[in-house]
């Protein structure tokens, strides 16, 4: 029997809700605030990835770190009553496959200020539940916080619960990225492409209806438009690498 599942990711935590936190406490944008403070690693609107422009080598590197939760969490649904945390070999696989997958696509922009190859440099670091958050918060690169968290759960977590529709179909939630920094994968849909989709949310990407490329669901590889956004979105702070 063939069961059709219409799966897409719902962004339940739109960016403006994160923005509100920043605007109520500071008049300057978090980017300006961080740019003026070399030791700043407080980030109020979730920007946890940066773009490094290397004019000498014509590359644009997207850099971010992900603290991967290794702790098991309780489940009301699985036979074992747990959702296992990521194992060390799974974390090794994340490190071996995610950046490679994107870099093998040879993402390139041919015109505009940032013309050149886009390279991603993403690192996955195992940590237990309690430490992951703190380590992500403390992760500072050149004055910018680039620490995200990456964990998995199942429908015990209401955010990962599917939506039933009157026609009998349902919408499964493959994962969510809270405040564009805290990735929660649904263990039933924890695939490479779904992971990439959530990771692109940490680059500032938003879900949109009828999206193509990486924001479609099920996700497809990043297309030209995605690369353009990756290279130009003001969401990510930009650093210029000095020409040697
Ligand atoms: Zn999404």
Image (spheres, grey):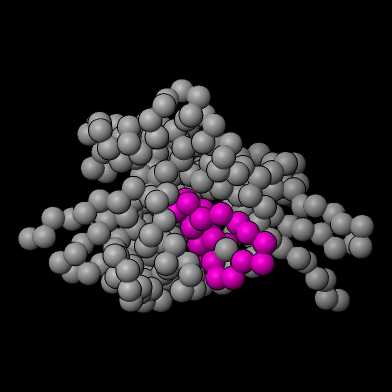
- The residue lying at 38 percent from left, 59 percent from top is 232
Name the one closer to the observer, 184 or 80: 184
Question: In the rendered view, does 94 fall on the left or right side of 56?
Answer: right
Coordinates of residue 165 in the picture (x, y in percent): 87, 57
Give coordinates of residue 9: x percent, y percent.
65, 56
- Camera-side residue: 165 or 158? 165
Q: Does residue 92 appear in the picture of this structure? A: no
Q: Which quadrant holds residue 67?
A: top left
Which range of residues does the magenta coloring cover?
A: 192-214
- Residue 41 horizontal side relative to residue 88, left or right: left
Q: Can see residue 232? A: yes
Is residue 203 one of those drawn in magenta? Answer: yes
Decide: is 171 above or below 125.
below
14 up-or-down from 243: above or below: above
Q: Residue at x 7, y 60 (%)?
A: 244
- Image location (x, y in percent) of residue 150: 49, 47
Instruction: Residue 82 in the image: state x and y as whole percent.
Output: 65, 44
Tell me: 179 left or right of 217. left
Tell me the residue at 30%/51% (across/down).
Answer: 238
Q: Quadrant of the N terminus?
A: bottom right
Compared across the picture, whether 142 is left or right of 25 comes to left
Residue 75 versus residue 62: which sits nearer the camera? 62
Residue at figure coordinates x 57%, y 40% from the top left? 16
């Amino acid at each position: 029997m063939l069961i059709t599942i219409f799966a897409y990711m719902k962004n339940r935590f739109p960016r403006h809700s994160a923005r509100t936190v920043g605007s109520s406490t500071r008049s300057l944008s978090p980017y300006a605030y961080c740019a003026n403070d070399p030791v700043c690693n407080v980030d109020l609107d979730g920007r946890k990835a940066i773009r490094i422009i290397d004019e000498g080598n014509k590359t644009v590197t997207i850099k971010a770190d992900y603290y991967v939760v290794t702790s098991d969490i309780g489940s009301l649904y699985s036979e074992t009553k747990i959702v296992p945390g990521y194992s060390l070999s799974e974390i090794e696989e994340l490190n071996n496959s995610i950046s490679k997958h994107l870099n093998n696509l040879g993402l390139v922009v041919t015109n505009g200020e940032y013309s050149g190859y886009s390279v991603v440099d993403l690192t996955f670091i195992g940590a237990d539940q309690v430490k992951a958050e703190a380590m992500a918060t403390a992760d500072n690169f050149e004055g910018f916080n680039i620490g995200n968290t990456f964990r998995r759960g199942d429908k015990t977590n209401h955010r990962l619960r599917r939506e039933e529709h009157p026609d009998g179909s349902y919408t499964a939630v493959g994962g969510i990225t809270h405040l564009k920094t805290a990735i929660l994968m649904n263990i039933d849909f924890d695939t490479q492409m779904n992971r990439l989709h959530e990771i692109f949310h940490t680059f500032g990407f938003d879900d949109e209806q009828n999206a193509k490329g990486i924001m479609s669901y099920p996700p497809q590889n990043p297309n030209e438009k995605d690369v353009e956004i990756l290279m130009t979105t003001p969401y990510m702070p930009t650093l210029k690498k000095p020409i040697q």
